[in-house]
Image: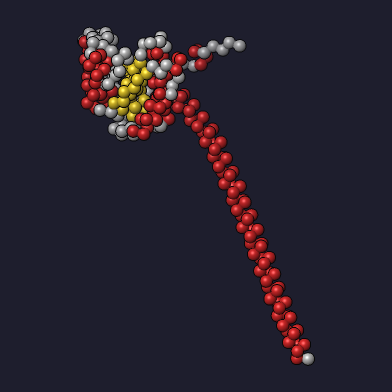
Amino acid sequence: MCLTLCLFKRGKASAVVLKKKITIYYEVKLMKRIVQLILLVSCAAVLFVCFNLLFKTESQAAQSTLEILTNAKTARKFTTEPVSEDHIKQILLAGLNAPSALNSQPWHFTVVTNKKILNQINEAMIAARTKGGSGGQGAPNSPPPKKLGLADAPVAIFVYGTNNLFTDSFDCGLATEAMSIAALSLGYGTKILASPTIVLNGEKKAYFDQLLQVPEGYSNVAVLIIGRNDESVDATAGASTRKPMEEKVRFIK
């Protein structure tokens, strides 16, 4: 009788232990399934966010480019903040990869951050405008302009071109515009100057070519000045409005 009772109690205890083990097994299995489900949902959420950001970024980039091209204004005044070397190289890459006839790449760029050199060229421009010499762009005894831009630029890119093809100057213009757009996309203000050609291609051309380390056979086409816009100055003040598309465009179907 005692033996039977002991065996019964032992069997009952074993059943309880087995039940607990089974319960724990299924609880662990359930927890694993829950964790797997959470991970699956998390991965799906991450993928959704990544794809959303990818397509949103592409859309924003296209929108940003259009906004830059349609809303850009010529800089009126720069701050004293320098343009980083990394940004200058990115801007130059845009110019170096501009299209050109027969891929001739007829340009040469000289980057100047030296204020002494920029002031020297600026003073030469003012002198030429005052006496109407070195290119004859200014009227004799006309008052010098208050600001030509070079003296205030944190960085100036002097764009030179060859005259091997009749398209060289046009191609250099494309490179200059490409660099301007790149600078604008990086948050800088820009201004394209043609007036420096008065002195850079004038009677002192040899001197300025040596100063700016210009290869033989190149002439100045333009100068792109770059810097952070001084927000205290309204770039649109006194600016003429853009003419409507209806006036400047014809569609032929």
The C terminus is located in which quarter? top right
Q: Is residue 85 above or below residue 140?
A: below
Residue 134 can be seen in this image: yes
Question: x, y percentage for residue 27?
Answer: 66, 65
| Residue situated in front as seen by the camera: 186 or 1 | 1
| Residue situated in front as seen by the camera: 240 or 90 | 90
Q: What residue is shown at x 68% (from left), y 76% (from top)?
A: 17
Q: What residue is shown at x 74% (from left), y 85% (from top)?
A: 7
Tell me the quarter of the picture where residue 155 sits. Answer: top left
Q: What residue is shown at x 45% (from left), y 14% (from top)?
A: 101
The reply, left or right, for residue 52 in relation to residue 5 is left
Residue 173 can be seen in this image: no
Tell me the quarter of the picture where residue 142 sits. Answer: top left
The N terminus is located in which quarter? bottom right
Question: x, y percentage for residue 28?
Answer: 64, 64
Question: x, y percentage for residue 15?
Answer: 72, 77
